[in-house]
């Protein structure tokens, strides 16, 4: 009898998670290195059983004013990213080292190309015409991710539960830890 009650309670709990509102809770956080806020830090939660992501507009990694925009783009693995050239000069986009390897060649103003980041990993992007241009695409095996803004702040949405989180920023060791998402959780990412 006791077992049945426990089972029923458990089922109710799980059902509540799935059906409560949108099912997603906000997790606010901030990324810092020492006391300085870190922009373009990426954080994501392990979620091997997460449902497939609904079709959304393709994320964009733009080219403007001799720069890539944004500097760091985070996507779920399997996502196709749009690469337009909205600048006034020719550009090129290539990635040869880690993550996805590709070379979009030199393409003119107004052209648009696409790359699917089919596996998790960090891709470093460059332009072979302008050595100062660099960007990162961070593909993660999770639909629950965020990147920090100029103040180091980020907001991630995930269903309630316990997660292992990972955090990345350029040129630093990755961080990992545990977080319980319950609607009030906050997450502090602290690099030394
Ligand atoms: Cu360029």
Image (tube, rainbow, N blue to C red):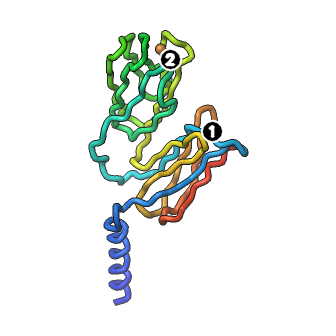
The residue that disc 1 covers is 173
Where residue 40 sits: x, y (%)? 55, 37
What residue do we see at 46% from left, 21% from top?
Answer: 64
Q: Quadrant of the C terminus?
A: top right
Q: Does ligand 1 reach within 8 Å of label 1's beta carbon?
A: no
Rendered view: 51 above or below 124: below
Q: Nearer the viewer, residue 189 or 58?
A: 58
Relative image position of residue 137 (x, y in whole percent):
46, 31
Q: Residue at x 50, y 17 (%)?
A: 66
Residue 104: which quarter of the image? top left
Q: Dot 2 corresponds to which residue?
A: 66
Instruction: Check the image and report above or below for 20 versus 166.
Output: below
Q: Image quadrant for the N terminus? A: bottom left
> Label 2 crowding class (10 Å Cα cut-off): few <14, some 14-19, many 20+?
some
Q: Earlier in the sequence, mark 1 or mark 2?
A: 2
Rendered view: 27 above or below 31: below
Cα distance in 3D space between marks 1 and 2? 29 Å
Percent across and percent down for residue 5 are: 35, 85
Q: Quadrant of residue 87?
A: top left
- Callout 1: helix, strand or loop? loop
User: Looking at the image, how many numbered discs can be counted on the residues?
Assistant: 2
Q: Residues within 10 Å of mark 1 (few under 14, many from 20)?
A: few
Secondary element under disc 2, as helix, strand or loop, is loop
Q: Is residue 146 left or right of residue 21?
A: right
Rendered residue at 39%/59% (across/down): 24
**Nearest to viewer (mark 1 / mark 2):** 2
Is the C-beta of the residue carrying label 2 under 8 Å from the nearest atom of ligand 1? yes
């Amino acid at each position: 009898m006791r077992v049945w009650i426990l089972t029923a309670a458990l089922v109710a709990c799980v059902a509540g998670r799935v059906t409560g509102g949108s099912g997603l809770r906000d997790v606010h956080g901030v990324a810092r290195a020492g006391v300085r806020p870190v922009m373009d830090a990426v954080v994501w939660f392990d979620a091997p059983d997460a449902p497939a992501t609904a079709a959304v507009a393709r994320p964009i990694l733009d080219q403007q004013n001799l720069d890539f925009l944004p500097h760091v783009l985070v996507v779920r693995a399997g996502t196709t990213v749009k690469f337009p050239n909205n600048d006034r000069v020719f550009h090129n986009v290539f990635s040869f080292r880690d993550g996805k390897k590709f070379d979009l060649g030199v393409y003119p103003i107004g052209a648009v190309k696409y790359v699917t980041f089919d596996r998790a990993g960090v891709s470093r992007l460059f332009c072979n015409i302008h050595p100062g241009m660099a960007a990162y695409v961070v593909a993660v095996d999770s639909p629950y991710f965020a990147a920090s803004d100029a103040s180091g702040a980020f907001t991630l949405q995930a269903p309630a539960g316990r997660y292992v989180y990972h955090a990345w920023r350029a040129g630093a060791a990755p961080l990992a830890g545990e977080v319980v998402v319950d609607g009030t959780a906050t997450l502090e990412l602290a690099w030394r």
